[in-house]
Amino acid sequence: MAALVTFLAVRFSARPPDQTHHYGHGKIENLSALFETVLLLVICAWIVWEATRRLLFHEVEVTVTFWSFAVMLTSIAVDVSRSRVLARTAVKYHSQALEADALHFSTDVWSSAVVILGLLGVEAGTWFPGLALLRQADAVAALGVSFVVVRLSLQLGRRTIDALLDRAPDGMEQRVAAAVAGIPGVRDCHQVRLRYSGSMLFIDLHVLVDGTQSLVQAHDLTETIESAIHEIAPQSDVTVHPEPE
């Protein structure tokens, strides 16, 4: 379900701007990431409930076989591969949807590893009657994984909500203002505004220029400003408003 939502989100968010979505459809990625965060938290809540029930109220006998370990090791190999690819692609294209999916599969890696430890504990409890408490290792392992996943999910959820609320990237405003202020012909740079829509960063800013410049000269200067900003934020849409000093 999570992978399907990510696939659809990336597909639809890549649509170009239209008459009703002037800034494109990038927010679909942020909504997808928020959905995956909520999905992970719901699953964790269910796992915590089930593990607690097994520990305190309803004992369940876990049967461990060769296939138990074979399935988990195969799962780890697959999840490591796709989580790495997703994480690299998410960084490259600044995609929160892919970042959420990478988190989803990376948590699967950790959970699978802990499951293996839990299965080993169950087996040890079977082999050594004096260590009967280890038969509950599977449920304890489930609780441990849940707490780790909840922590990571909340971190991703906070970044997703920041994007939906148009929070500016930390430090980017100062970097843009400093780069623009250093361009010959710019007397001042102010009112810098930034917002993400999916992977695209929209940047608006005002600059003071020499009032004796012609319209063509002012336009050429704005082109220079946009090029300088693209060196800092390659995947950005820049709007420069020149004002005569």
Image: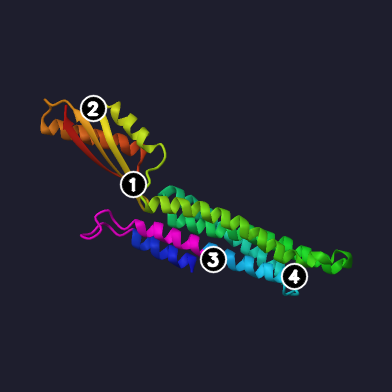
Label 3 vs label 4, nearer the camera: 3
Element marked by disc 3: helix
Residue 32 shown in magenta:
yes
What crowding class fits label 3: few (fewer than 14 Cα within 10 Å), some (14-19), or many (20 or more)?
few
Q: Amino acid at mark 4?
A: Phe
Element marked by disc 1: strand
Q: Amino acid at mark 1?
A: Arg
Mark closest to the chain's N terminus, 3 or 1: 3
Q: Indicate left or right for 42 with 51 as reference.
A: left
In the picture of the structure, the residue carrying the numbered disc 3 is 42
Query: Pointer 3 and pointer 1: residues touching (CB < 8 Å)?
Result: no
Label 2 vs label 3, nearer the camera: 3
3D distance between C-alphas at marks 2 and 3: 52 Å
Element marked by disc 2: strand
Q: Residue at x 75, y 64 (%)?
A: 137
Q: Amino acid at mark 3?
A: Val
In the picture of the structure, the residue carrying the numbered disc 1 is 195
Q: Amino acid at mark 2?
A: Val
Rendered view: 225 above or below 31: above
Query: Pointer 2 and pointer 4: residues touching (CB < 8 Å)?
Result: no
Residue 167 shown in magenta:
no
Residue in front for this viewpoint, 155 or 76: 155
Residue in front for this viewpoint, 200 or 154: 154
Q: Indicate left or right for 186 with 129 as reference.
A: left
Query: Pointer 1 and pointer 4: residues touching (CB < 8 Å)?
Result: no
Q: Residue at x 42, y 53 (%)?
A: 161
**Residue at the front extreme, as displayed:** 57
